[in-house]
Image: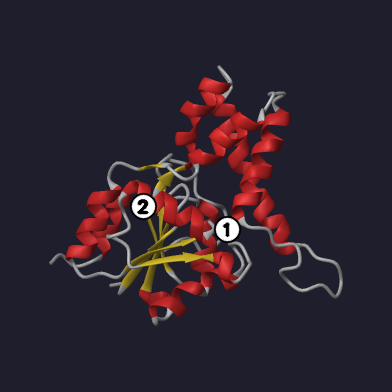
Amino acid sequence: MPKAVLFDAYGTLFDVHSVIQAAESLFPNQGQALSLLWRDKQIEYTRLVTMSRKPGQADDALYQPFWNLTRAGLRFAAARLGLALTDAAEQRLMDQYLQLSPYPENRAVLQALRDRGVPTGILSNGDPTMLNAVVQHAGFDKLLNHTLSIHSVRRFKTDPAAYALGPQALGLPAQDILFVSSNAWDALAATWYGYTTLWVNRAGAPPEQLEPAPSHIGSSLRDVLGLFRSP
């Protein structure tokens, strides 16, 4: 049985596509397309700045905070779709990332883990300011013991330096920590790092065709509770 649990934030605790309503009000019939492309480009940029450098440069030479990459992803997505993104529209959509909707079962799961005495936390690409804002907006600040941002190591997931933050903060080996993500690539990479993992496959997507696979697969955050002893 794991001794602690760490959650990915974006897509796992918080629905990144809850921006669709605001996007749709700004760009009718384009909200979903904008949200999907925005998210894909946001993640692509994290990989680009983490993996790229000139010979002799420091590993983090091209690092930019997640907020900056999120804004860049939004601008690209709007341009790709031919949408006129005004400064006001851009700011409105960016502000949505500070108040993303949590998935409906999450509060009860976090409370149950707290009742069982299980240490919990977030391990996320998000900047500390972004994470603190969305956690407080959801009212999760009293239910989480740790909020870990890759900003401290300036290397985005799936870099090992990002995943190393969990064992360092919790004082446990990775295999004793359950890492939970709805992003299949994140769950897979965390498995390779050494975590016990749960991929929350809300969309019923096919599994990644690489091994070793995540330790567990579920369909909602409620599946976390089955891996911890009841009080």
Residue at the location (30% across, 50% down)? 139
Q: Where's the C terminus, which quadrant?
A: bottom left
Name of the residue lying farthest toward the right: 55
**x and y percent of residue 212 in the render?**
52, 65
Q: Quadrant of residue 140?
A: bottom left
**x and y percent of residue 219 in the render?**
35, 46
Q: Earlier in the sequence, mark 1 or mark 2?
A: 2
Q: Amino acid at mark 1?
A: Leu
Residue at the location (55% across, 55% down)? 185
Q: Quadrant of residue 120?
A: bottom left
* Secondary structure category for the residue under label 2: helix
Residue 4 vertical position relative to residue 184 in the rendered view, above or below? below
**x and y percent of residue 10 in the render?**
47, 49
Q: Amino acid at mark 2?
A: Gln
Q: How far is disc 1 from disc 2 in space, using C-alphas?
A: 36 Å
Q: Where's the N terminus, which quadrant?
A: bottom left
Which of the labelled discs sits on residue 148, or is there none? none
Image side of residue 170 versus residue 98, left or right: left
Nearest to viewer (mark 1 / mark 2): 2
Residue 55 vertical position relative to residue 30 in the rendered view, above or below? below
Image side of residue 211 versus residue 155, left or right: left
Residue at the location (15% across, 65% down)? 230
Image side of residue 50 versus residue 92, left or right: right
Residue 61 vertical position relative to residue 210 in the rendered view, above or below? below
The residue indicated by pointer 1 is: 210
Residue at the location (77% across, 62% down)? 52
Which of the labelled discs sits on residue 136, or is there none? 2
